[in-house]
Image (spheres, rainbow, N blue to C red):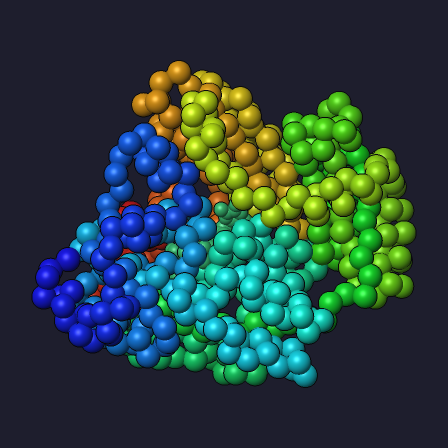
Amino acid sequence: MKKDDLEALGALLGSGKVRTDEALLDARAHDYWAASHLRRWRGERPALPGCVVQPHETADVQKLLAFANERGIAVIPFGLGSGVCGGVIASPDAILLDMSAMNRIREIDEINLLASFDAGKNGLEAEEAVAALGLTTGHWPQSIGVSSVGGWVSTRASGQFSTAYGNIEDIIYAIEAVLPNGELVRLGKAPRAAAGPDLRHLLMGAEGIMGVVTGVTLSLRRKPEARGYSAFYAGSMEQGFEAQRRIIQSDWRPPVMRQYDHPETARNFPDHAQGEKAVLLMVHEGPQARVEAEIADISRIALAAGLEQASPAISELWLAKRNHVPTWTEAFEHRIVADTVEISGKWTDIAPIYHAAIASLGEVPGIVIASAHSSHVYRSGINLYFTFAVLLDKVEAMEPAYFECWRRILEATAAHGGGIAHHHGAGRIRKDFIVSDLGISGVDLLRRLKDAIDPHRIMNPGNLLPDRPL
Ligand SMILES: Cc1cc2nc3c(=O)[nH]c(=O)nc-3n(C[C@H](O)[C@H](O)[C@H](O)COP(=O)(O)OP(=O)(O)OC[C@H]3O[C@@H](n4cnc5c(N)ncnc54)[C@H](O)[C@@H]3O)c2cc1C
């Protein structure tokens, strides 16, 4: 970054908010994307941003974006860096906008069940603040302790309890954001509106390319009165999917409903694994009477679909271990490259997607793990969360194998009619595949919206949108 830009920025915001110390630049150079970690482990030094700006309030973000827009300087928003798709990649001519110092609780409204936070607020801290009042956001991503509420909005995140409580788009009430020219917008005023298109969606899933989310209001729930557990064995993934379809289409909504194929059952619940059987586990929440009725009727539906009862301890075990955040380095040391890839599909497409992706992964030389589980259920379909791991002799072969596995899963999904991204966003790993979901005209529309909102293309360049031409 040019010296005079840096000096002007320091004068504009106060030098304490504009940092150039190398340790901080290095810590913000990328997110949790396995490819970035692999490159670093291999000894490649990541490109560092020109500086890290740490705003304390919305007005700082407004000043910063107006400044960057006028001078044509790229700005890369950074929440807490738990994104897994390469949504944050620094470049020396860019400003890294670190939102973590904007972390206030703005308001908790116990009557209307609303809570407003600065966008950089740690998700677990947000949840703990409302939990102290007997409330919950209902949004529990596995990464809750290492992600921000602004990051949730920006990646269209999904929590583990989404089947009853919805994904982040169902929980967001209002968004405060700064557009690339420094203008402030507040989107979302009433519990529901028909005052034109819902402009909140311009920011949801925008992954930093449309502006900066500075504040988020979430719609809360009262903590459930009761919680219960149930679990079943399915003879095949198809049989389990069919049971899940019947359960959800009977209008039962267990917040957690997850189905693990037999390799994942053996890895995650070894004491409960039974040969080739899949496990379907559930957590039920709500008023006591509903929880009891739900467990009883779901059990009836599952058994009628051919499933067998399993120990509810499986669900309790999952709940106890669910927020584990793994590190990549240990796998790399063993010459293993691995990742998880989430997709979704209609009920009629999901088994073909599962089988095609697993079969395709099986052809990758060195593959040691190719497995999947489902974790978010809808009336019309379900997601799948694939895990792959490849063991290689040569370090140079690890990165090509990584991209090959991703390509195979996304192509198998697209070929069988599925959506190529359920909740981690696109970042860099998926940007060339979003055409499969949006179509060429959809990508073109997104580009035109981006160009209208960010004509100088300062916001997170290289992220989410495919490089031109398509
Ligand atoms: C172990 C692990 C488990 C995970 N589990 C889940 C899960 O269960 N569900 C789920 O949905 N995700 C999960 N994730 C992915 C990740 O945590 C989410 O994508 C999360 O929403 C990212 O939040 P963040 O604050 O860390 O964002 P970052 O990683 O900092 O940024 C993500 C993207 O959003 C942009 N961005 C961030 N903040 C802002 C802002 N204020 N304004 C504009 N743009 C912004 C960035 O530029 C980037 O493109 C998991 C990740 C890990 C490592």
- What's the residue at 41%, 38% (across, down)? 34
Q: Is residue 30 above or below residue 106?
A: above
Q: Quadrant of residue 318?
A: top right
Give the total of numbered labels.
0
Taking the image as drawn, is residue 434 in sight? no
Taking the image as drawn, is residue 318 in sight? yes
Q: Nearer the viewer, residue 124 or 158?
A: 124
Q: Is residue 160 above or below residue 201?
A: above
- What's the residue at 71%, 51% (across, down)? 256
Residue 66 percent location from the top left of the image: 23, 75
Residue 77 percent location from the top left of the image: 34, 61
Q: Quadrant of residue 308?
A: top right
Q: Is residue 10 above or below residue 320?
A: below
Q: Quadrant of residue 32?
A: top left
Q: Nearer the viewer, residue 340 or 62?
A: 62
Left or right of 447: which side holds 163?
A: right
Left or right of 143: which side holds 19?
A: left
Residue 76 percent location from the top left of the image: 30, 59
Residue 272 percent location from the top left of the image: 78, 31
Left or right of 53: which side holds 383?
A: right
Q: Is residue 309 above or below residue 138?
A: above
For the N terminus, which image quadrant? bottom left
- What's the residue at 65%, 29% (across, down)? 267
Left or right of 389: which side holds 53?
A: left
Which residue occupies the extreme top position in the image? 393
- What's the residue at 76%, 29% (across, down)? 271
